[in-house]
Image: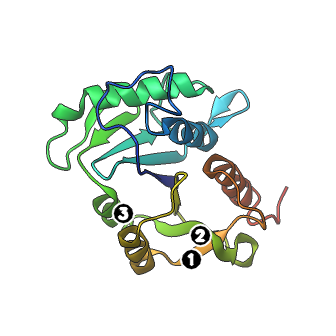
Amino acid sequence: MRQFLIVGHEAPTTPSFSLDDLAGGAGRLDILCRCVTSAFVRSHGIREDVRVHLVLNDQFTIQFDGSNLKRLNPDERSTAALIRTALENRENAIGHMPAESTPGVSIRRMGFAETVEKLKTETTPIRLHETGTPIVDIDPPDDPLFVLSDHHSFTNDESDQLNDVTEHQVRVGPVILHADHAITIAHNYLDTSGYEKY
């Protein structure tokens, strides 16, 4: 299982945002939507062995599970609609218990620290960062969890938490990339067993 956790520092926590202004009025939700697309969508299908966790403003975590995911299309607007539907169901998320909003999409009342704490027991957490070790210098781990930030850097608290749980901090190349592009490269790294098998 491949997993990705993306932090949205300004992401909406209510469903009141417009699908026509994802880059402005929705706290750069466009970035998170592109990350979801890059994590799942491939030519003529989706990756079923993937989970994505979007941490919204350190209040909610929306999980996308590829094995059950329906209605995901390769455009930001339809992905944002799935996120908005999840937020419409946020009152049904009691404590850390999830509320499923659509097939394969659920929401939890969990911020960054709680989500990382939950996932670290079932994954190998890896922080993607432009100052990390080149990804080619590590062997592909079992059950990786790649942790990325949106257009903002990780906060000091987030960095401290990641320092405690991540086995590696890696970069995917010599040039700083958008988060969704980094996800595509991480997939290629895993698909090729560390660029050794094509």
Tell me which amino acid carries mark 3: Val
State whether residue 122 appears in this view. yes
Return the mark for residue 168.
1
Mark 1 crowd level (few <14, some 14–19, many ≥20, 10 Å Cα): some
Report which residue position mark 2 lands on.
141
Report which residue position mark 3 lands on.
116
Task: Determine whether the residue tagged by mark 3 lies in a helix, strand or loop.
Answer: helix
**Is 33 above or below relative to 102?**
below
| Distance of label 3 from label 2 (alpha carbons) | 17 Å
Return the mark for residue 81.
none
At x 64% / y 75%, what residue is drawn? Answer: 132
Tell me which amino acid carries mark 1: His
Mark 2 crowd level (few <14, some 14–19, many ≥20, 10 Å Cα): some
First in sequence: mark 1 vs mark 3:
3
On screen, residue 114 versus residue 75, left or right, reads left
On screen, residue 158 versus residue 146, left or right, reads left
At x 39% / y 80%, what residue is drawn? Answer: 164
**Is 107 above or below relative to 146?**
above
In contact (CB < 8 Å): disc 2 and disc 1: yes
Quadrant of the image containing the C terminus: bottom right
State whether residue 1 appears in this view. no
